[in-house]
Amino acid sequence: MKRIVASVFIMIVLLTGCKDDAAHNKAATGPSSSAPPAETSHTLIARYNQLLVEGYKTTNMTRLQEVATAELAEKAYYHMAAIGEGKSRLVSELKKIDFADTDCSKPAKCSVVTRELWDFGYADILTGKRSNEVKDYQYDVRYLLENRQGSWMITDISATGEERKELPTWGKMFRKQ
């Protein structure tokens, strides 16, 4: 059961966003076409996280397709909808992101590994009351990016995180206990 809860949390964290103002401002302007692939990939990852935050707030994940494949945007949409069925919204804050490894040695491809520190929880859609909050959750995320017809985009995301006792159960998250 702990592994299921940890796996669910990792999926949740993958679909949350970044609150780093510097990354937000840089990502909002978009990467320079002359920027090195490593810099471009870091900017896209920051933008992806920003768009996820906005997507959860507006219940619209369509804009993720600016920086990610339609399949990744669809996964985010389904996750957001599942949480919404529980009458909640995911709220999160990326407290720290370190770009641990960036490999752009293959033509038109980059692999970026980040180490991220998050706070997250859920807010009732009607009242805004927060519940099931977790502080300082650390995990590693691997982003794969490709240059497709002159535009870089995120094509795959995978994460591993630490197992934590305070992670809520599905029943608790959806008020079924």
Image: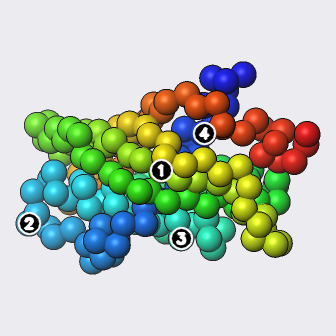
For badge 4, the amino acid type reads Phe
Mark in the foreground, 1 or 3 = 1
> Which residue is labeled 1 in the image?
118
Q: Earlier in the sequence, mark 1 or mark 3?
A: 3
> Which residue is labeled 2 in the image?
34
Q: Residue at x 55, y 49 (%)?
A: 135
- Which percent across, then down, holds residue 96? 36, 53
- The label on residue 63 is none
- Which percent across, then down, holds residue 120? 58, 53
Q: Is residue 79 above or below residue 22?
A: above
Mark in the foreground, 2 or 1 = 1
For badge 3, the amino acid type reads Glu
Q: Callout 2: 10 Å neighbours few (<14), some, many (20+)?
A: few
**Looking at the rendering, in which quadrant would you find the N terminus?**
top right
Measured in 3D between alpha carbons, the distance from the residue under mark 2 to the one under mark 1, in whole angstroms, is 32 Å
Measured in 3D between alpha carbons, the distance from the residue under mark 3 to the one under mark 2, in whole angstroms, is 28 Å
Indicate the quadrant where residue 85 lies: bottom right
**Looking at the rendering, in which quadrant would you find the C terminus?**
top right
Measured in 3D between alpha carbons, the distance from the residue under mark 4 to the one under mark 3, in whole angstroms, is 19 Å
Q: Is residue 114 left or right of residue 49?
A: left
> Which residue is labeled 4 in the image?
9
For badge 2, the amino acid type reads Ser
For badge 1, the amino acid type reads Trp
Secondary structure of residue under mark 1? strand
Q: Earlier in the sequence, mark 4 or mark 3?
A: 4
Mark in the foreground, 4 or 3 = 4
- Which percent across, then down, holds residue 106? 14, 36
Secondary structure of residue under mark 3? helix
> Which residue is labeled 3 in the image?
54
Q: Callout 4: 10 Å neighbours few (<14), some, many (20+)?
A: many
Q: Earlier in the sequence, mark 3 or mark 2?
A: 2
